[in-house]
Image (cartoon, rainbow, N blue to C red):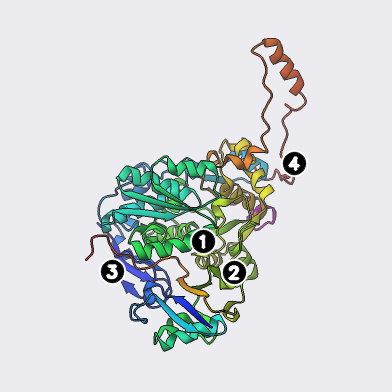
Amino acid sequence: MSVKVRIPSPLRSYSGGADVIEVSGANVGEVLNGLKAKAAGIETRLFKGPNQLNRFVNVYLNDEDIRFLQNLETPVKAGDELSIVPAIAGGAAKVSDES
Amino acid sequence: MSYVIGLKCKECGHRVPVSPVHVCQACFGPYEVEYDYEKMRGKVTRESIVAGPKSLWRYRDLLPIAGEPKTGHFSGFTPLRKAQRLARELGCSDLWIKDDSCNYPTYSYKERVVSVAITKALEFGFDTVGCASTGNLANSTAAHAAQAGIRCFVMIPHDLEQGKVLGSLIFGPTMVRIRGTYDDVNRLCTEIADKHGWAIVNVNLRPYYTEGAKTHGFEIAEQLGWRLPQHTVVPTAGGTILPKVYKAYREFIELGLVADNQPKIYSAQAAGCNPVVKAIHKGIDIIEPQKPNTIAKSIAIGNPADGYYVWHAVKDSGGWGESATDREIVDAIKLLARTEGIWTEPAGGTTLAVAMKLIQQGRIPRDESIVISITGNGLKTLETVQNDLPMPEVIEAKLTEFDEFLARHQVEAKLQTHEKLPRPSRQGVPVV
């Protein structure tokens, strides 16, 4: 199943600046693991062990936190959207007059 | 004189200079402001603090601003009240209320974090501030932004109490009401901060924002006579205030301003939204998110950003956590109002109700010093007590009708003690 994965700005250095990557997989875990084909190294930031997400990474499937679903085993279907969001809501901000 | 070294990741120690970032580039953990405590020694003293303004800025040496404060000049420095009548009800001897319900200008503890965040936003050159809020933060951000003359956006869940909604709108921000829970709002704000480059005070300015909460703890220590309470009960929503009150105590100990009496901190949550307390009871520091269901809307955060740090502050200090049902929350609001003349909102009711449980359980000894943190004001949450306060009947302006009124109510006018409390022990309770 091909799903869109939204990449937060702290991780876009791995994706060459892309904020969305399309990946195939049967469930959330497979999709996240599949990211490394297009964003080499990103898996080191997402996972702290095999099948164990970094505590500071929250993953949402179509806006629902996967911890309310089946975590990494949550099945995905074509057209689904995964969002990776740093658990402590935040991100690099640009000062308004920065060029 | 700024004692700030820079930002340091709480998890992996990665350091960056002072900048409006919140998420560690190396491990996604949270950045925290790092101070040079060695340089402070001998300079940040009881005398230097007492010489400061009667506001939260008297603690500016321990706050992450580089220049002069831009807002909050009259914020903080709220009363620490000895709660004699409440103490008698609960059978305690050294009970205090730290009363942020009267904080200036929007009547909640949020003035503390907003004053620092907006000052910092101006230092960074932002022209727009914003926040994700369950009500009090939006009120405070909008008011301080109005004072500073800076553009403001407040993002709130769609179903907040009317007082909280009007309490932001009056200051003229752009308000966005989002269909969903606070957790949905917060997640959207991450994306907004990313995309639009605004200073979302509790998102991308979070390391600076959270430092303001320490002033709640500093004031407790100073106002108690430069001593720390043995037990402090604090509400937990997103997890900002509890770890920072603990940090404030530890900073004062580190600087030699107070003795280390091993102060314990306790987390208070609503039974309908208690992810951190559940984890405390389980003894595992994994905070499982919940879908909130409680009248305590201001603390209805099912996915607390700093829940992990609340858990650890509680554990390190030897404290505990408890939950209060909606009924217990409302009863506690009424008890506090009737014994101490303080009207708090559900977050405050939650904290008092939980303190009562911890005392009844024997976890907090009745004869030790206890501070209960009251973080918000009941005037903003009328809906909470409306059904519990029946309207008295109307009479004509005639003395006969008044006397009849008195006679009619004579039976109800008898003074009643609160039935739900256990009979308090009289041992050690001073005669007032």
What is the three-letter code of the residue carrying label 3?
A: Pro
Disc nearer the start of the sequence (2/1)? 1
Say which mark, if any, is on residue B17. 3
Measuring from the top left, give residue B327's x and y in whole percent. Answer: 69, 47
Dots 4, 2 in contact, CB < 8 A: no
Measuring from the top left, give residue A1's x and y in whole percent. Answer: 54, 83
Q: Circle 2: is it few (<14), some (14-19), or many (20+) Cα within 10 Å?
A: some
Q: Which residues are magenta?
A: B359-369
Name the quarter where the N terminus of chain B is drawn.
bottom left
- Which picture quadrant has residue B126? bottom left
What is the three-letter code of the residue carrying label 1?
A: Asp
Left or right of B121 in this view: B277: right
Q: In this picture, is B104 found above or below B112? A: above
The residue furthest front is A78
Disc nearer the start of the sequence (4/1)? 1
What is the three-letter code of the residue carrying label 4?
A: Glu
Prevailing SS of the magenta stretch: loop
Residue drawn at x 67%, y 17% as measured from the top left: B395
Q: Circle 3: is it few (<14), some (14-19), or many (20+) Cα within 10 Å?
A: few
Real-space Cα separation, disc 1 to disc 3, in angstroms = 31 Å
**The residue marked by circle 2 belongs to what chain?**
B
Mark 4 vs mark 1: give the one in front: 1
Residue identified by numbered label 1 = B184
Q: Circle 4: is it few (<14), some (14-19), or many (20+) Cα within 10 Å?
A: few
Disc nearer the start of the sequence (3/4)? 3
Mark 3 vs mark 2: give the one in front: 2
Q: Is residue A23 magenta?
A: no
Residue identified by numbered label 4 = B419
Residue identified by numbered label 2 = B288
